[in-house]
Image: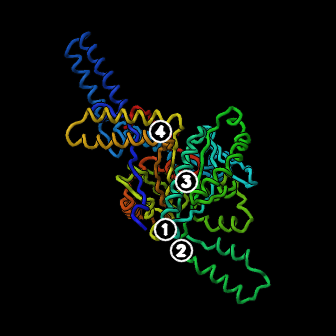
Amino acid sequence: MSTSDYRTYGQWRKPRSTGMGGATFGTTMLGIGAVIFLVFIGLAFGFVVALFCGVITVIAFVPLVIERDGRSGYERAILMFQFRRALKRGEHTYSSGTFSRIPGGRYRLPGVLADTEVYEGTDANNRSFGMIHMAQNNAYTVVLDAFPQGGENFDQSTINQAVGNWSQMLTAMGETSDILAIAAVVETLPDTGIELYETVSQNVRADAPKLARDSMYQLATGLTKGGVRLGARISITFAAQTAERKKDPSEQAVEIARRLPSITAAAARAGVPATPMSADEIMGLVRRSYDPSSLVNIEKALFSGEGTGMEWADCGPRSAINEKDRLVHDGAVSVTWEMREAPKGAVTERVLQRLIEPNAALPIKRVAIIYRPHAAAEATDIVDRDYRDALAGLTSRTGIASAQAKLEVQATLQSTTEQARGHGLTRFGILITVTQPADSADVPRVDALVRDLSTQCRLQVRRSTMWQDAAFASSLGVGVIAPEHTTIPSFLSA
């Protein structure tokens, strides 16, 4: 195989409107407005008053210009204020069940998932699918059970074609204005062996020789003992665009049922065969995520065909404590990291392999890649604006900084060219969640392991400080889109 068969990917850039001195465009406009205001103050009240107001203005602008970990000073201050206020009010602690304040004594999901409901429908191929309705932003999410084929047994040209088909699927979803996000979740779990055992049970004939039956059952129980298995799913979040679909979930279910076959066909062409998950399966994955000790019981119920018998109001944790750097829930401790910066330079399609593959030191690990495609009409304006901002940044910088500005211009120029040829424009981010038993949790060790794996994948990550509960829900892939729930004004961000 020639080296030309290997393709590399990159030149992604963080969305940012470049202003004066490397500040954002919004900060620059505020600064210009402040200067004009100070001029009027000086003319009306004199130089001393204008100087005093100028010092205050400069102090107020410093937190906007100086950022750390991708957040401005105001963002960090507001997050800290909101978190401390929640601590003071006791809002960081969640308790459900018979003796709780939850209506009906149920185990409803906490936080951003509190007002969600689950419905079930049947698509055009007569497959049942669960649909999660989030009323606060009129969004509906379907989850697909995915079976990635991997790249071990395929030549490079086949892998390249699969990556291209995945890109085309994201582009096609961006051409429809009602898809808010696509989340690809790859997780590892302790292998209970129940799936293999139930598969063997359903395929072994009762009249087969006893030795043959015993051999099959011994293999089924021995092959998976103490191992870690890999699972994957894809969730797609739709926005209800008509008054009928906002009020009546059945109307949205009809639309999703019509489109699901084409979506699963597109995923299969990308090397990821997928089938819709039923409402029972969705409830099972949410329940075992909040309560890892229920994994065995849930898998027994699902793979035996009996069903879990749960309702959506029973999927939440018995208790959950949202601490600054971790989430404590039902005898487990979960920590979530977020992508701070995408890999620099060119990478291959295997860039995340070390992060997503099974790791005995991190048996319960979840990596969620969240795509938010821009609509086709919106993409053209965005790439043109980015190109103009990059040109403006090139003219406003000198010295070493101008080298980075030149790279920005080249990247944005390529984006405008590719978009003009019909390519899509998609924002993406990554969330990494690791869950450990509470009695043996070693968060510093896990933090070091995750950061080491991220570095090997050329990712820069940061701990999701002061919003661990929402980050945990976002990484589940059940329709939580973090930017849709932010409480920080955009003009105060970095």
Q: Residue drawn at (68%, 51%), measured in percent from left and top?
A: 261
**Spot occupied by residue 295 in the image (x, y as percentages of width and height):** 61, 65
User: Along the polypeptide, which appears first: circle 3 or circle 2?
Assistant: 3
In the image, 179 versus 245, the foreground residue is: 179
Q: Residue drawn at (43%, 40%), measured in percent from left and top?
A: 417
Residues packed near mark 4 inside 10 Å, few (<14), some (14 to 19) or many (20 plus): few
At label 4, which amino acid type do we have?
Ala
Q: Quadrant of the N terminus?
A: bottom left
Q: Disc 3 to disc 2, how far (Cα)?
A: 32 Å
Pointers 1 and 2 in contact (C-beta within 8 Å): yes
Q: Which residue is mark 2?
A: 227
Does 48 appear above or below 466?
A: above
Question: Which quadrant holds residue 416?
Answer: top left
At label 2, which amino acid type do we have?
Gly
**Spot occupied by residue 86 in the image (x, y as percentages of width and height):** 47, 42
Q: Which residue is mark 4?
A: 420
Mark 1 lies on a secondary structure that is: loop
In the image, 24 versus 387, the foreground residue is: 387
At label 3, which amino acid type do we have?
Asn
Mark 3 lies on a secondary structure that is: helix
Badge number at residue 358: 1
**Spot occupied by residue 247 in the image (x, y as percentages of width and height):** 70, 35
| Of marks 2 and 4, the one in the foreground | 4
The answer to whether residue 346 is seen in the rendering is: yes
At label 1, which amino acid type do we have?
Pro
Pointers 2 and 4 in contact (C-beta within 8 Å): no
Q: Disc 1 to disc 3, how far (Cα)?
A: 26 Å
